[in-house]
Amino acid sequence: MYDQKQMQVLTAQVRALVQENHMCEAEAAAAKAMADAPHEAQPHNLMGIIMERENDHIQAMKHFRAAWALDPTFVPARVNMERYGSFSFTMPRPAYDEADCPQEANVQKCRIEYDERGIGHVVRG
């Protein structure tokens, strides 16, 4: 099982290896993390980035979906699915961790207010 600090170290290591085009080493590190922590989203997200760099789009999307399924709150997996799943002619910038994700601005808070008949209504603000 990996803790938060170990995941940060893994992410930094894989990011550096991918940027230096050491894909075999990056894939080995991500695969080891997937074996050691099978229920963690981060190793699958990293493997998806590696697969995209190796032009294996289908496998990359499977890993991004697996990461998102393991942890629906893991924003980098969702961002990578959106970026790599769009029809773009440019290579998107991968989201290794939350720092690579755009801040979701203008998120409106909602609440439920009940009327006199007990019917709930969603109210923004």
Image (spheres, rainbow, N blue to C red):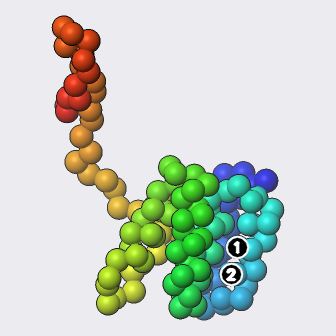
Q: Secondary structure at mark 2?
A: helix
| Residue drawn at point x = 42 percent, y = 77 percent | 84
Assess disc 2: are there few (<14), some (14-19) or many (≥20) residues with their C-alpha within 10 Å of its C-alpha: many
Tell me if residue 25 comes above or below residue 35 in the rendering: below
Q: Position of residue 121 (x, y in %)?
A: 22, 25
Asked if residue 36 lies left or right of residue 124, the reply is right
Q: Which of the 4 image quarters holds residue 19?
A: bottom right
- Which secondary structure, mark 1? helix
Which residue is at the front of the view, 15 or 28?
28
Q: Is residue 27 left or right of residue 66?
A: right
Q: Name the image quarter holding the C terminus.
A: top left
Task: Tell me the kind of residue under disc 1.
Answer: Ala
Q: Amino acid at mark 2?
A: Ala
Compared with 51, 32 (above or below) is above
> Going by the image, does 116 lie left or right of 96?
left
Contact check, label 2 and label 1, Cβ < 8 Å: yes
Evaluate whether residue 48 shows in this view: yes
Look at mark 2 in the image and give the residue it sits on. 26
Residue at horizontal 24 percent and vertical 17 percent from the top: 119
Coordinates of residue 72 in the picture (x, y in percent): 52, 51
Q: Which residue is mark 1?
A: 30
